[in-house]
Image (tube, rainbow, N blue to C red):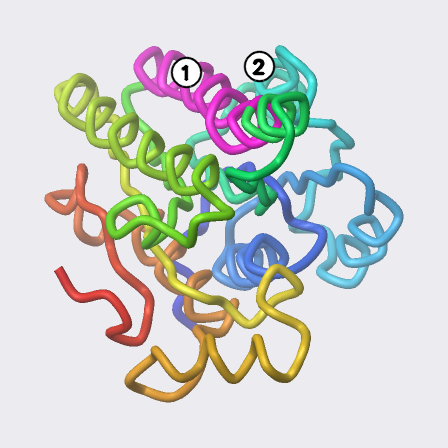
């Protein structure tokens, strides 16, 4: 049996469902000890953790919309591993509309919410992770961005696109600055993924699929598989790269 993640310890944010849950399952199956994270769906995450088994060290409840939550989350997760975290997958995020025609209060509130969860909390987790990895001789940071960070999004999701573009820049910067210390940093840029964040009505679903040459959205397991491959260290020279997972809907 191939267990490329044996001996590794991973924090996966937003792992109560979707990509995060798929990653938690796969990482555990490949031998990693995993710390899961949830915001509101804590009971669901704990049920999933129990189903995965003893490879899951615990589930941490943390509201990443609160300032400083990312730093606290990493510290709690690291404590569960006995100070041995060497993989972080920053998957948690929100897709919140902020229409240009909205009133100023809604506009500013939406921008603040999206940037806090998608960028600032991720940056706090990344900062804590890199500091720990440097002190331990290395580690892997995998940040889930979006094709929107490169190509942009629709006019109602300017904040989302901007936050994901910033995640890409942050990841590349950390890779360049700390590669000498054994820190490997990667970004993934999915398009639509078949989760609850994707369109749920027939018209929206048809429109989303129509722009994807292979005719379907990415499956959560596909994104999880790429996370696991990168976390294995099998291609350390890819550090700093952003990997597109969008069915050729955006080719750059």
Q: Nearer the viewer, residue 246 or 72?
A: 246
Q: Position of residue 234 (x, y in %)?
A: 22, 53
Q: Is residue 121 above or below residue 160?
A: above
How crowded pointer 1 is (Cα within 10 Å; few <14, some 14-19, many 20+) is rated as some
Q: Is residue 34 visible?
A: no
Q: Position of residue 191 (x, y in %)?
A: 39, 63
The residue that appears at 51% across and 33% down in the rendered structure is 118
The residue that appears at 35% across and 60% down in the rendered structure is 226
Q: Is residue 208 magenta?
A: no
Q: Is residue 70 visible?
A: yes
Determine whether, in the image, residue 110 is placed left or right of residue 123: right
Secondary structure at numbered mark 2: helix
Secondary structure at numbered mark 1: helix
Q: Position of residue 178 (x, y in %)?
A: 20, 19
Q: Which mark identifies residue 71? A: 2
Q: Is residue 232 above or below residue 246?
A: above
Determine whether, in the image, residue 219 is placed left or right of residue 17: left
Report if the CB atoms under discs 2 and 1 are less than 8 Å apart.
yes
Q: How many marks?
A: 2
Q: Is residue 60 above or below residue 51?
A: above
Looking at the rendered image, the quarter that the N terminus falls into is bottom left
The residue that appears at 32% across and 58% down in the rendered structure is 229
* Residue projecting furthest to the right: 43
Q: Nearer the viewer, residue 225 or 216?
A: 216
Location of residue 197 by image quarter: bottom right
Q: Which residue is mark 1?
A: 127
The residue that appears at 50% across and 25% down in the rendered structure is 84
Which secondary structure is most common in the magenta stretch?
Answer: helix
Q: Which mark identifies residue 89? A: none
The residue segment tinted magenta is 112-136
Q: Is residue 128 magenta?
A: yes
Q: Which label's residue is closer to the chain start, 2 or 1?
A: 2
């Amino acid at each position: 049996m191939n267990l490329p993640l044996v001996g590794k310890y991973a924090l996966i944010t937003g792992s109560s469902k979707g990509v995060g849950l798929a990653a938690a399952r796969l990482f555990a199956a490949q031998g990693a000890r995993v710390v899961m994270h949830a915001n509101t769906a804590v009971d669901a995450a704990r049920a999933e953790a129990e189903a995965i088994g003893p490879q899951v060290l615990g589930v941490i409840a943390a509201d990443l919309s609160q300032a400083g939550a990312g730093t606290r989350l990493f510290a709690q997760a690291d404590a569960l591993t006995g100070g041995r975290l060497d993989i972080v997958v920053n998957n948690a995020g929100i897709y919140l509309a902020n229409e240009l025609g909205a009133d100023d209060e809604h506009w500013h509130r939406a921008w603040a919410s999206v940037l806090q969860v998608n960028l600032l909390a991720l940056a706090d987790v990344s900062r804590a992770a890199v500091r720990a990895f440097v002190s331990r001789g290395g580690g892997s940071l995998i940040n889930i961005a979006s094709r929107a960070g490169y190509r942009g999004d629709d006019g109602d999701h300017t904040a989302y696109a901007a936050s994901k573009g910033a995640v890409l820049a942050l990841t590349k910067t950390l890779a360049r600055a700390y590669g000498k210390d054994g820190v490997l940093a990667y970004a993934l840029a999915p398009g639509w993924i078949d989760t609850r964040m994707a369109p749920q009505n027939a018209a929206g679903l048809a429109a989303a699929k129509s722009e994807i040459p292979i005719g379907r959205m990415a499956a959560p397991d596909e994104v999880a598989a790429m996370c696991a491959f990168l976390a294995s260290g099998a291609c350390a020279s890819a550090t700093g790269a952003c990997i597109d997972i969008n069915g050729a809907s955006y080719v750059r």
